[in-house]
Amino acid sequence: MRPASLSSLALIGWVLCSCSTQQPTAVVGEDWPPSARAPVYPITTAPGVDSPEALTRLLEQRWPLSSIVTFCTPERRWRPEYQNLVAMGEVWKGKLHVGSATGFDKIWWYGTVDHGRIAEYSLNVNRGRDHWVLEFGTPESIRKPAIVAPNPSEPCFVGHE
């Protein structure tokens, strides 16, 4: 189990967008990470964080398409030089709003698993070459409302370039 202070620091880091920088990278491939476990059960699985299916359902409820559209403005695109979540060990992944006309190429998440439960995740959206990171989350942070319209002048966002 991860110490609560580490999870709190990760959440604070996201809120302040004080992410570490690294070289720009291309948008991740269609099936990244390739070794991650994807949902195999119906999306109607009860919400929770103990399976990829359950987290996908919970994130769809937390991030309805209207909230995703509100977040995904040109100013809030993720700066490519800012690092996304580095998943280690066992990894789960999933796609949101599959089968719906979303206006996006892909709405997806991936995350690190600890003792059969999600420990942390990153929720992402792609449209063409545009990429948004909606949130980094933990089982603790997911209990709070999603930040649907963060300040676009935060350093992790492209802003008004």
Image (spheres, rainbow, N blue to C red):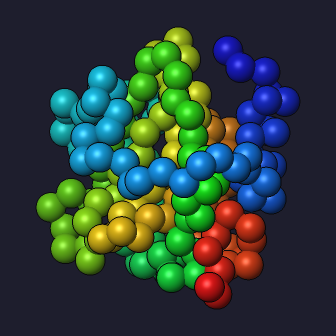
Q: How many marks?
A: 0
The image quadrant that residue 37 belongs to is top left
Looking at the image, the residue that sits furthest to the left is 99
| Relative to 27, residue 87 above or below | above
Residue shown at 74%/58% (left/top)?
Answer: 17
The image quadrant that residue 60 belongs to is bottom left
| Relative to 72, residue 145 above or below | above
Residue shown at 30%/71% (left/top)?
Answer: 128
Residue sitting nearer the eye, 23 or 42 = 23
Which image quadrant: the C terminus?
bottom right
Residue 18, horizontal then vertical, whole percent: 79, 54
Residue 14, horizontal then vertical, whole percent: 72, 53
Residue shown at 64%/87% (left/top)?
Answer: 160
Q: Is residue 134 visible?
A: no
Residue shown at 42%/78% (left/top)?
Answer: 69
Q: Is residue 139 visible?
A: yes
| Relative to 133, residue 73 above or below | below
Which image quadrant: the N terminus?
top right
Residue 98, horizontal then vertical, whole percent: 21, 57
Residue 20, horizontal then vertical, whole percent: 73, 46
Looking at the image, the residue that sits furthest to the bottom is 160
